[in-house]
Image: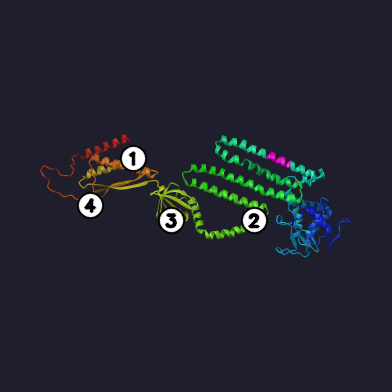
Amino acid sequence: MKISTTFCLLIFLVFNSVYAQKGSTDTLEYSLATPYHTILTHLGYLQDDNYHAAIAARSLHPEHVEGDRAEDLAIMLKQVLDGRGIMINLDEVPRKSDYVDTVTNKRRYYLTKQYPDLYVEKVGKRWYFSGKTIKNIPKWHKEVYPFGTDKLLKLLPSLGTTKVLGLYVWQLIGVLILILLSFLLHKLFTFIFEKLIIQLLLKLGYQKLADEVVIPIAKPISFLVIFPFLIILVPVLQLPITMSEYVILTLRAVWPVFAIVFFYRLVDIISIYLSKLADKTESTLDDQLVPLLRKVLKTFVVVVGGLFILDNLEFDITGLIAGLSIGGLAFALAAQDTIKNFFGSLMIFVDRPFQVGDWITSGDVDGSVEEVGFRSTRIRTFRNSLMYIPNGVITNQMIDNHGLRVYRRFMTTIALTYDTPPDLIEIFVDGLKQIVKNHPFTRKDYYEIHLNDMGDSSLNVLFYIFFQVPTWTEELRARHEILLDIIRLAERIGVNFAFPTQTLHVETFPEKKGNSPEYTKSTTELKKTVEDFLTSKKSKS
C-alpha cells in the first residue's frame, strides 16, 4: 500500500538500524545504509512535526553539494515530489544494502517513472541521491513552480500554522482564492467568445459558424485555459501528499477532455472553410473529400486525446501502443482487401481520374459516378441500377472518362441516291459545311464533310463533326438540331436520301413518267436556293 510522507516520520521513529549513526545533534539519528533508509531520511526529516533540513540534506551526495545549498536542494526536491503529487511507496523501496537495478545492472534505485534521472545510488557503504539528481533539482523545481510561484512557497506558510479539517488556514484560503479566480476567468473567457468573437463572425457573414460551432465550444475553451492555470497554482498550496496526488491527477486527466472537445469542434470550423474552398473549384471530388476528411480528423482527435488522458492517469501507454501495433499488423493481414480499397480511394482523390457526375467506362462498368467513398465508388448505370466498385479494383483498371471530353464527336453517313447529279452533291456538301459553321455549339476549327464512298445502293457523304457541350443531354439536343437542318436542306434543294433497294428498269410507257426525279434547275439557281435557305436559318436563330 501507499504511505504518505506525513506518516513516514512514524515509521522513521520506530526503526532502529544497526547502521545508525550520529546526526547534527546527539538526539537525532539517521541511516543511509539502503535505498529505503536514504529516502526515509530525506522525507522523514522534512515533515511539519519533525523538520530538520540539515539531516535531510545528508541524503544528498556530499561530493556534489554541502552546507546550506544541500539543505535548499533537499527542500526543493521534496517540494517537487509534493507539487507533482508523487507519492513514494516505501513498501516497494528495497531494503538491501547490495541492491542492483536489473535494467541498468547498477547499484541504483529509481524513485518514479516521471523523473528518470531521479535515483539514489550506492557510494561506498552508503546510498545517496546521485549527482545527476542533484544537478536536475533546480530545473525540476522551475518546471513545477514556474512564473515566480516558487516565491509563494516561502510566503504562504508564514501566514500561520493553525489547522482546520487537516489543512492550514492559509491553504484553505488559497483553495477559496483559486475557486474564485477560476469562476471569474470562466465568465471572462465565455463572455469574450460568446459576445466579441460571435459579433465579429456575424458581421463577416458567418452566422452558421457562430451558431453551430463557436457557441458550443465557448465554455470548453474557457476551461481549456483555466485548467493549466490550476495545474500551475495548486502545487503552491503544498496540500497533503494523499490529497495533492489525487487533485493533481484529476486536473491533469480532465484537462485533455476539454482539449478534445475544443479540437473536435475545431475540425467542424476547418470543414466549413474547406467546404467553401471546394465550392469554388470545378471538381466535385472535393465535395466528397471534405466529409471524409472531417470524419478522419475527428477520429484522430478522439484517439490521441484518449491516449493523453491515459498518459496523465499514469497508465503505461507504451505497452498499449505496442499492443495496438501488433494488433494492427494482425488486423492488416486479415483486412488487406479493405486496406487496399482504402489506399485505392486515396489514389482517386490524389490523381482525380474522375469526379462525381462524370460518365466513365471501366471494364464492364459503364455509367455516371455518384459517390466516391473510402471503400468503394458508387456508379449509376444507364439502366438506372447502382454498381458498387471496390476502389482497389477500379484503380487497377483502365478508365475511360467521357466526362473529361472537351468535344463530343458525332459521325454519321448521309446516303444519297445514285441519280443525284454531281453538281447538286457538291452544293449539298457545301450547305452541310455551312450548317456546321452556323451552329453555336459545333467545333469550327475541325470537321470533315465529304463524299466519301460509293455504296451498293447509295452515294455516301461522311458527316464527321464535334460538339462543344458539357452534358449528354445537350449533345443530343445539338444532334437533333443538326439533323433537322440536314433534312430541311435536302428537302429545299431536292436531294433524295437513299436506302437499300433494287430497281427494275422498264421502258417508260407513253402516259407514265419514270420514278427518277427530273433536275431542271441550273447550278446558279441551286446555289441561290442554298443561300436563301441558310439566310432564313440565320434570321430564325
Q: Mark 1: few, some, or many residues within 10 Å (few <14, many ≥20)?
A: some
Question: Between tags 2 and 1, which lies in front?
Answer: 2
Q: Which residue was labeled with disc 2?
A: 317
The residue positioned farthest toward the left in the image shown: 510
**Residue closest to the eye, 187 or 60:** 187
Q: Amino acid at mark 1?
A: His
Q: Residue at the spot x=49%, y=42% of the render? A: 279
Q: Which residue is mark 4?
A: 456
Q: Residue at x 75, y 61 (%)?
A: 108
Q: Which residue is mark 1?
A: 439
The numbered mark, 2 or 4, whose residue comes first in the sequence reads: 2
The x, y position of residue 426, in whole percent, is 25, 44
The C terminus - image quarter? top left
Q: Earlier in the sequence, mark 3 or mark 4?
A: 3
Marks 3/4: CA–CA distance = 42 Å
Q: Quadrant of residue 163?
A: top right
* Residue interval drawn in magenta: 177-185
10 Å neighbourhood of mark 3: few (<14), some, or many (≥20)? few
**Is any atom of residue 83 visible in this view?**
no
Q: Residue 421 location in percent, x, y?
A: 21, 44
Residue 520, image x, y percentages: 18, 40
